[in-house]
Image (tube, grey):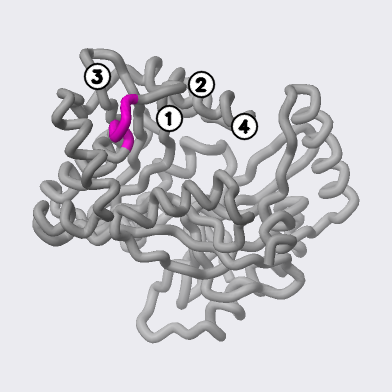
Amino acid sequence: MKLIHTLNKDNENIDVFASEAFLKSRSSEYGWFVTDAYILPFIIDKKLFFKRMIFTTACLPLKKNTSIADEKHFLDAVIQKCKEENLCDFIYKAQANVLFNVCPESSECIEWGTYVVDIASTQENIFNNIHAKHRNRIRHAEKHGLIVQETDNIVQVCEIIKQTFTRQKKLLYPSLSDIQKLQDNLQEHIVFFEVLKENVPQGVFIFIFDDTTAYCIYAGSIEKPFSGSIALMHYKAMVFFNTKKLKNYDFMGARINVDKGSKFETIQHFKKRFGGELKQGYAFQTILKPLKFRFFNYLVKIYFKAKGSQFEDIIKKSKANK
């Protein structure tokens, strides 16, 4: 097991979320765990005197015919390396679309998923594979003159995303500087979309993409967007990436165990109706320093409460819903 801070040329293009360009846009401290079988990128997020590690991909195989047992051995070695070198206080849940095949030792695990649409077919097939309700909404939006286009107005994009998160009482929305760092580092691998009704933005998306997959990392809308506008934007984005010869369209995460009738169930139905496959695996967190982890969560809960919101531990919430 090696811990490296610079990628060699053979591994530079394995995944956009494993690239140095992406990692350094998220944190000044980052690296990769490497063996002859796998590579696993991470960032270190520092808050006060807390250090949490976040993986930005699953274990990326470097050779053929790796097994679940190999992945478990690798993840256990990663956790041991974190302990021995005091790399972090806890390993937080990975990025939203990251799916591990196995749960490592001494970790809290939940089933996790992400909806991925095959966009390698024809544009006609992409549309026909969408659920009839979404197709009707898309036609409705087009009939009323809505337009989807790229935009370079990231100030407006960030503001709409912020408004969306604020309405949902979510405090962890990306700042303008966060998005600017992504744009500066990823350059041709990031794109911004907006959907307009008579030149008034109804919603916005931010995509990161590589040679195979487009990832919808952030989305937002005005309070009452025109009916069908968000469905239209997803469809037009799929067409856009289809013309770039990409194969997959990733909706970036899906909770497996959700409360019936909850907003999360509604979100899952919305994603599912674009004809995607629900890919499933595991998400986990590993607590290396329990006292610091409890103190961190305590402070986060106080902060959220002071802002009129409520902190949610996704791992514990999902386990409770099983």
Residue designated by label 1: 220
Furthest residue to the top?
199
Query: Which residue is the site of mark 3?
Result: 197
Q: Which residue is mark 4?
A: 170
Viewport quadrant of the N terminus: bottom right
Nearest to N terminus: mark 3 or mark 4: 4
User: Which residue does the image show at 40% across and 16% down from the upper left?
Assistant: 155
Locate residue 83, reporting x and y percent. 76, 62
Is residue 106 in sight in this rendering?
A: yes
Q: Which residues are magenta?
A: 226-230
Residue type marked 1: Gly
User: How many labels sit on residues?
Assistant: 4
Spatial distance from mark 3 to mark 4, Cα to Cα?
27 Å
Q: Amino acid at mark 3?
A: Lys
Residue occupying the point 31% across, 56% down: 13
Question: For mark 2, what is the residue?
Answer: 163
Q: Quadrant of residue 77?
A: bottom right
